[in-house]
Image: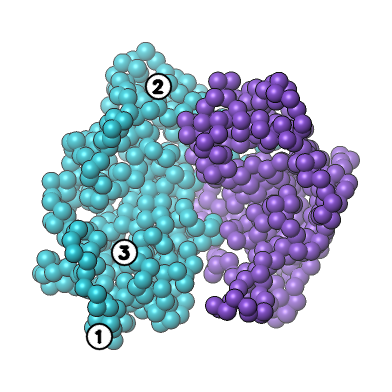
């Protein structure tokens, strides 16, 4: 199966007075159509940077793409300017963030915000890609503030019954009870789970080819998390989109993903289908992470924490970045960086233990 | 757990209501309350760990803060070490020698301008009345106990990583050699690998100092790992209480069942999360539904559930459930 999005040798750094931090170091990854790929890793491993660089929202400066490609349906997104990139955002690649309260506009009713998403899609389909709503201009251009006239009133005028039906339909799609009432409410009047569902409704009303979900359930309770993830998974099949799920929670990734990529200190160290990754992890870091998960009572399970801590990325590291914490570290590990290779079928890893064609797995005995 | 153990702390019908103002009139007399903790009775045993689990807003942190006398209870009694501590005559200094707390976010529970040595040492001067030398010794000892290098004494919290900061917070809590430590979400701000380190540390400390823990968490996996007993809270009430092992193996309250089913587990062959059948969300604490507060989300709810609040009843020795239809989940 061809890939929908292909990331190749992407390197991104943040520059500050304290030095240059390499947030992504030669990352290669691909997402296939209608697949849920989870990227897991601890804080600071570069998973959010990866998401932002796909959708072109890296804060620049301090962030800078050093090299590499993000190929989406044959176009290299890294090369696109902001205005071309904007045509992809929303309609082709949508994103939902961790904290729905800060990604919804607090002063507009929920229905109006969804209406806007629908209108933008429509205007793009009609070929007026340059016609943007003032909301988009406000967020992407620094310029004079938008005219004072209440945008809401203008929307009221344009709120045709057909548009209203569409809003209600998209709210129903994400199982919001009483959509007629909810669309009249402001984001602060809704619970966390509802807000996140509205973000999903807005993102999916565009029928994007790729949905990037950056920690979509981290701020939610477990029962709500279960509902939101279940919904996301069902809608994925309905709308036929691919999902890139960024999460720090291995268990969440394990529950919903088809493939999982593990990141460590700016590298993708392992990528595989979910079953192989959790039963036969190849990279020592993945193995370490898995043995950090409490999976039973203290009387039965012994946690084996990974010794040490994440290296300081301000200093360039030669060799594998996990060397200092790795129980299997060899001489070669601190001398050169292991390539990200396909050690087994559909199981890629960057580790010298799984060198050229050996295919053995010393970590399992 | 058949050992004869003494209770270290007991609460009887402990309640904490917060008044809420309605409208803009500051003189409005109409009083509404958030029943954050509502008639909670439970027992903690010496040397064991009780986990209080529940979702955000269920009152678990308020319960912990009320027990630690950080807020005054509205009603009810807390007996710690055989003495009631809520009558207002408690010498807090004596109390906090034996009862300490570790908070969720070390970022905000440590003063960024105070060196680690003083963060741990200063409370000891007041609490224990120790001199400089004794304090320095105790600081050194507790830093070693939590696995921090001795030169941490002169560092500021900003120079430490998240895991190290939480270690400092734990060192501060154990330094007066307390009997009970309340851990309020001790690992939820931490990454998986650091969480594992802290959990291991907590177990080690419990063994070394024979501590009792009250663990407040929303993370079922952490609760299952660390605790001997478990209390499940929903909207201010304890809905299920018992041995952790028993509850995890056979939860009886419909909410506990849903909660455990919603907790993701790291096993791709057991995709429990996508089978969960729970509806709705935690109700508002100001206007909770009448009767059993779980009734709008409960698959077994019947008429009685909207009228009567179910009482905790024993379903097997030491296993209490507050549900009108416990037999349905047997």
Q: Residue at x 77, y 32 (%)?
A: B128
Task: Name the subunit of mark 1.
Answer: A
B71 or B277, which is in the foreground?
A: B71
Chain identifier for the cyan-coloured part of the image: A
Residue A257, x across and y down, in percent: 40, 50
Q: Is residue A60 left or right of residue B238?
A: left
Cα distance, mark 1 to mark 3? 24 Å
Say which element carries label 1. helix
Cα distance, mark 1 to mark 2? 62 Å
Say which element carries label 3. helix
Reading the chain from its start, which is encountered first: label 1 or label 2?
Answer: 1
Say which element carries label 2. helix
Mark 3 neighbour density, 10 Å: few (under 14) some (14–19) many (20 or more):
many
B311 or A102, which is in the foreground?
A: A102
B70 or A219, which is in the foreground?
A: B70
Q: Report if residue B70 is visible in the image.
A: yes
Q: Residue at x 45, y 80 (%)?
A: A178
Above/below status of B290 relative to B58: below
Residue A230, x across and y down, in percent: 45, 60
The residue pinned by badge 3 equals A203
Reading the chain from its start, which is encountered first: label 1 or label 3?
Answer: 1
Task: Name the subunit of mark 2.
Answer: A
Chain identifier for the purple-coloured part of the image: B
- Please name which of the two marks, 1 or 3, marks the residue nearer to the observer: 1
B152 or A51, which is in the foreground?
A: B152
Residue B74, x across and y down, in percent: 76, 64
The residue pinned by badge 1 equals A157
The residue pinned by badge 2 equals A323
Cα distance, mark 2 to mark 3? 40 Å
């Amino acid at each position: 199966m061809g890939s929908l999005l292909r990331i190749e040798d992407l390197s991104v750094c943040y520059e500050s007075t304290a030095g240059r931090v390499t947030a992504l170091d030669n990352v290669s990854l691909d997402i296939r159509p209608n697949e849920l790929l989870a990227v897991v890793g601890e804080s600071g491993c570069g998973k959010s940077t990866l998401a932002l660089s796909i959708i072109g929202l890296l804060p620049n400066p301090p962030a800078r793409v050093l090299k590499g490609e993000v190929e989406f349906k044959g176009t290299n997104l890294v090369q696109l300017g902001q205005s071309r990139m904007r045509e992809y955002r929303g309609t082709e690649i949508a994103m939902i963030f961790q904290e729905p309260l800060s990604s919804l506009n607090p002063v507009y009713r929920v229905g109006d915000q969804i209406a806007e998403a629908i209108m933008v899609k429509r205007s793009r389909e009609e070929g007026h890609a340059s016609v943007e709503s003032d909301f988009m201009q406000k967020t992407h251009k620094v310029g004079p503030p938008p005219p004072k006239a209440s945008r809401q009133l203008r929307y009221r005028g344009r709120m045709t019954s057909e548009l209203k039906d569409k809003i209600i339909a998209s709210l129903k799609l994400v199982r919001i009870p009483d959509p007629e009432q909810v669309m009249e409410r402001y984001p602060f009047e809704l619970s966390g789970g509802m807000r996140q569902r509205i973000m999903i409704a807005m993102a999916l009303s565009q029928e994007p080819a790729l949905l990037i979900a950056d920690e979509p359930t981290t701020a939610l309770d477990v029962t709500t998390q279960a509902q939101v993830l279940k919904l996301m998974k069902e809608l994925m099949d309905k709308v036929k989109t691919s999902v890139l799920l960024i999460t720090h929670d291995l268990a969440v990734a394990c529950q919903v993903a088809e493939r999982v990529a593990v990141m460590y200190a700016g590298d993708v160290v392992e990528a595989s289908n979910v079953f192989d990754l959790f039963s036969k992890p190849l990279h020592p870091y993945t193995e370490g992470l898995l043995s950090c998960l409490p999976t039973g009572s203290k009387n039965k399970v012994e946690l084996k924490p990974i010794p040490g801590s994440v290296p300081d990325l301000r200093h360039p590291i030669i060799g594998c970045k996990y060397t200092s914490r790795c129980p299997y570290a060899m001489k070669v590990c601190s001398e050169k960086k292991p390539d990200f290779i396909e050690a087994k079928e559909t199981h890629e890893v960057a580790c010298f233990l799984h060198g050229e064609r050996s295919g053995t797995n010393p970590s399992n005995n | 757990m058949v050992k004869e153990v003494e209770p270290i702390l007991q609460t009887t019908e402990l309640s904490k209501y917060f008044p809420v103002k309605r409208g803009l009139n500051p003189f409005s007399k109409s009083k509404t309350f958030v029943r954050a903790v509502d008639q909670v009775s439970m027992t903690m045993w010496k040397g064991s760990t009780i986990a209080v689990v529940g979702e955000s807003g269920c009152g678990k942190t308020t319960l912990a803060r009320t027990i630690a006398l950080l807020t005054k209870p509205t009603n009810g009694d807390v007996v710690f070490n055989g003495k009631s501590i809520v009558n207002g005559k408690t010498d807090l200094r004596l109390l906090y020698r034996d009862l300490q707390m570790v908070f969720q976010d070390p970022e905000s529970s440590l003063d960024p301008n105070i060196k680690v040595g003083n963060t741990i040492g200063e409370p000891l001067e007041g609490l224990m009345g120790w001199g400089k030398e004794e304090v320095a010794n105790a600081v050194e000892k507790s830093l070693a106990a939590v696995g921090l290098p001795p030169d941490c004494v002169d560092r500021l919290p900003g120079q430490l990583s998240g895991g190290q900061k939480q270690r400092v917070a734990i060192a501060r809590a154990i330094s007066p050699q307390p009997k009970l430590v309340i851990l309020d979400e001790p690992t939820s701000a931490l990454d998986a690998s650091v969480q594992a380190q802290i959990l291991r540390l907590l177990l080690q400390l419990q063994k070394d100092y024979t501590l009792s823990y009250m663990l407040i968490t929303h993370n079922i996996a952490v609760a299952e790992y660390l605790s001997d007993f478990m209390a499940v809270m929903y909207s201010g009430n304890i809905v299920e209480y018992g041995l952790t092992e028993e509850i995890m193996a056979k939860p009886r309250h419909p909410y506990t069942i849903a909660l455990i089913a919603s907790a993701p587990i790291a096993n791709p062959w057991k995709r429990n999360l996508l089978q969960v059948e729970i509806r709705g969300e935690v109700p508002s604490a100001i206007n909770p539904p009448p009767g059993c507060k779980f009734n709008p989300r409960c698959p077994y709810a019947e008429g009685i559930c909207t009228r009567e609040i179910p009482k905790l009843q024993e379903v097997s020795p030491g296993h209490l459930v507050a549900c009108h239809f416990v037999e349905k989940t047997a």
